[in-house]
Image (spheres, rainbow, N blue to C red):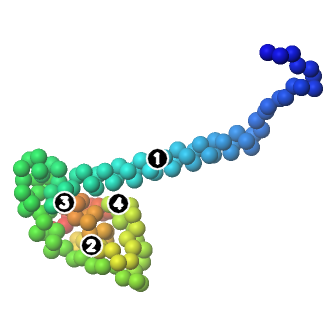
Amino acid sequence: MPATTGADVVVCEYDGVGVALELAALAAFVVLLRYAAVLYANHLLATLCVDDDGLTAEAIRSGYGRRCAPSGGLDDAAIARLPCFVTGAGAVAAECAVCLGGVEEGETARALPCCTHAFHARCVDAWLRLRPTCPVCRATCH
């Protein structure tokens, strides 16, 4: 280490504001990273658990056909009888409780007759194949 004189000494100090800003930035990064991980996990669940024909991975492994619901959910005929609609221009922007995404204008939505909660049709169809209850209030759909 080279010898220094009194004039060459540099002292680095963190003030309270600098530390607080660094901690806030780190916390924001962790929150964003967690949010991205949750979105990715939801994407994986949506793409890996339901194939192109609408069968769950469990149903395929068990050998069940499209009409059977191995986990106690509704079959496709019962789901098809549930009311479906396309959201219009004056519709209130709602959130789908299954995928946590917004239901926007022009998207197909499904309202459950047991409780009138509405969701993306694709999301609630996958939910109802696994369990016959509303994702929000747990009312049983027949």
Dot in front, 3 or 4: 3
Label 1: state its secondary structure: helix
Dot in front, 3 or 2: 3
Q: Which comes before the other along the chain, label 3 or label 2?
A: 3
User: Residue 99 — which label?
Assistant: 4
Dot in front, 1 or 3: 3
Residue 88: give x, y in percent of width and height.
36, 82
Q: Relative to 112, is 68 on the left or the right? A: left
Q: Relative to 124, is 31 on the left or the right? A: right
Q: CA distance from mark 3 to mark 4?
A: 18 Å
- Residues under numbered marks 1 and 2 in contact, where contact means CB atoms less than 8 Å apart: no
Q: In this rendered view, identify the residue nearer to me: 25 or 78.
A: 25
Q: Which residue is mark 1?
A: 34
Q: Which residue is mark 2?
A: 110
Q: CA distance from mark 1 to mark 2?
A: 29 Å
Q: In this rendered view, identify the residue nearer to me: 65 or 47.
A: 47
Q: Which residue is mark 3?
A: 52
Q: Is residue 100 above or below residue 5?
A: below
Given the image, on which type of amino acid does mark 2 rest? Arg
10 Å neighbourhood of mark 4: few (<14), some, or many (≥20)? some
Given the image, on which type of amino acid does mark 4 rest? Cys
Q: Is residue 130 visible?
A: no
Q: In this rendered view, identify the residue nearer to me: 40 or 82.
A: 40
Given the image, on which type of amino acid does mark 1 rest? Arg
10 Å neighbourhood of mark 1: few (<14), some, or many (≥20)? few
Residue 112 sits in which quadrant?
bottom left
Q: Is residue 122 above or below residue 85?
A: above
Q: Which comes before the other along the chain, label 1 or label 2?
A: 1
Residue 123: give x, y in percent of width and height.
28, 63
Q: Which comes before the other along the chain, label 4 or label 1?
A: 1
Q: Relative to 50, is 28 on the left or the right? A: right
